Amino acid sequence: MRVHFIAIGGSIMHNLAIALAKKGYIISGSDDHIYEPSRTNLAVAGLLPPEGWFPERITPDIDAVVVGMHAKADNPELLKAKELGIRICSYPEFIYEQTKEKMRVVIGGSHGKTTITSMIMHVLKAIGRDFDYLVGAKLDEFEYMVKLTKDAPLIVIEGDEYLASPMDQRPKFHLYRPNIGLISGIAWDHVNVFPTFETYVNQFRLFIKSIEPKGTLVYNKEDKTLQELVLEDQSKINKHGYRTPEYTINKGITYMHTHLGNIPLQVFGKHNLSNIAAAFTVCEWLGVEREAFYAAIKQFRAASRRLEYVASNNDSVVYQDFAHTPAKLRASIHALKEQFPGKALVAIIELHTYSSLNEDYLSEYRDTMKEAEYPAVFINQEALKQRNAGSITADTLKKAFNQPNLEYFSSIERMKHYLQDLEPDGKNLLFMSSGNYGGVNLVNFADKFLFK
């Protein structure tokens, strides 16, 4: 089978292309810009195309064209594929077609998706189960973000609620039709696509309805909005709720309370304990024994940029977190304060997404940084231009966050000088973003804070 990828440089797109090439498919692709690590990964796999769009490469012998979100509706290759009558699909649609005969486990929710997915993957690998997967971050234990084989009877999928492609305006997680579907919680996001909270909530209502008959919904019983959706749903599926387990923190280590005793963990924060409960419940439905789960989860480390350690000195520590929604921001700050009591926290959030740069949405951040003694916001001015957002002032941010002592950095240089001038003793530092702070090396920035 021959498959062509339009916008092959995307994180999942290029990983899917590599997975299919490993499966024996003939793969080609295109993109106008390909950044790292996609460029190197594609080059190593022998799949790196020249940059640009080349409609002459779209020929009748192509069996399917997979279109990424980066491609526009008037893409010349896409138009050529339509002209030739070649099958066109988004990658979630293609994944479903490839896995119709497998058990599909789909992890959805406004936050925690990557961590829960990676926890399940970690446990299944530890017990020797054969499975395929699609996850939204590079995990140390796994070479790629997508594995797609002929023989694995199970696939674990991180289910994103963002749109599938420019032509397919359905959320990605509506297309997988899970046998086991999980929702970790609902907190309004993607306001450029879902302009009201109810519109956003409805996507999760539809996700529940997409679960296969006699399938299973695993859900967070501590989320009020989600509880209401579950109670109203009349689908003929199993429903299994979970709650955050009890835990204690002793000498900087979090212990989860279980019937086998207190289990030491390598992750921390109430939200991560909730994520473990979610992964535990899914693994139970997959037949994993409790003892095997606990033995494996003790060794689990955070996925890349999920409350990930960056650097430290004798007194202070620096973490980074993939966070931009108000709920995740509040949870991440609380986790650091709870894990390191008595330490002041410097918390810097990069407002990066369409939602977070929308002035009408900013009020959702009210009081989310109250636990941080030194709250700060960074906004890359180029991101403002790209999203056609208006200028955002320091006063606007202080009012939105309800934080008079909030610092605002409109440039990397200002943030660098702030960290250089700040005395680190008695303080920890947390970087939060779903972007990359303009491409800076956070280790270098951490050093400016830690070492004077």
Image (cartoon, rainbow, N blue to C red):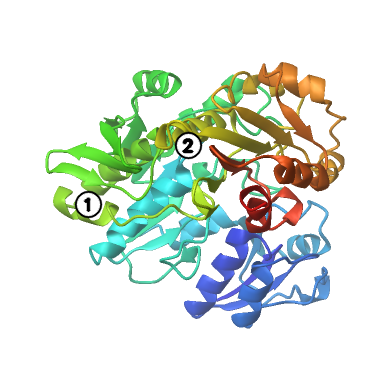
In the image, taking residue 74 as reference, residue 151 lies left or right, namely left
State the count of labels: 2
Task: Give the class, few, some or many, for how many residues have Cα within 10 Å of label 1's Cα (few <14, many ≥20).
Answer: many
In the image, taking residue 367 as reference, residue 135 lies left or right, namely left
Residue 109: give x, y in percent of width and height: 47, 36
Report the Cα–Cα distance between label 2 and label 1. Answer: 26 Å
**Sequence-wise first label, 2 or 1:** 1
Q: Is residue 323 above or below residue 33?
A: above
Residue 149: give x, y in percent of width and height: 41, 71
The single residue placed furthest to the left in the displayed view is 260
Residue type for callout 1:
Phe
Residue at 45% x, 31% y: name it: 342
Task: Give the class, few, some or many, for how many residues have Cα within 10 Å of label 2's Cα (few <14, many ≥20).
Answer: many
Q: Give the quadrant of the N terminus.
A: bottom right
Residue type for callout 2:
Leu
Q: Quadrant of residue 243?
A: top left
Q: 186 and 8: which one is in front? A: 186
Q: Secondary structure at mark 2?
A: helix
Q: Secondary structure at mark 1?
A: helix
In the image, taking residue 27 as reference, residue 133 lies left or right, namely left
- Examine the rendering and report whether any part of residue 75 can be seen: yes
- Disc 2 marks which residue? 336
Residue 207: give x, y in percent of width and height: 46, 36
Q: Nearer the viewer, mark 2 or mark 1?
A: 2
- Examine the rendering and report whether any part of residue 355 can be seen: no
Residue at 65% x, 37% y: name it: 348
- Disc 1 marks which residue? 293
Asked if the residue under mark 1 is in contact with the one under mark 2, i.e. CB atoms within 8 Å, the reply is no
Q: 197 and 272: which one is in front? A: 272
Q: 422 and 85: which one is in front? A: 422
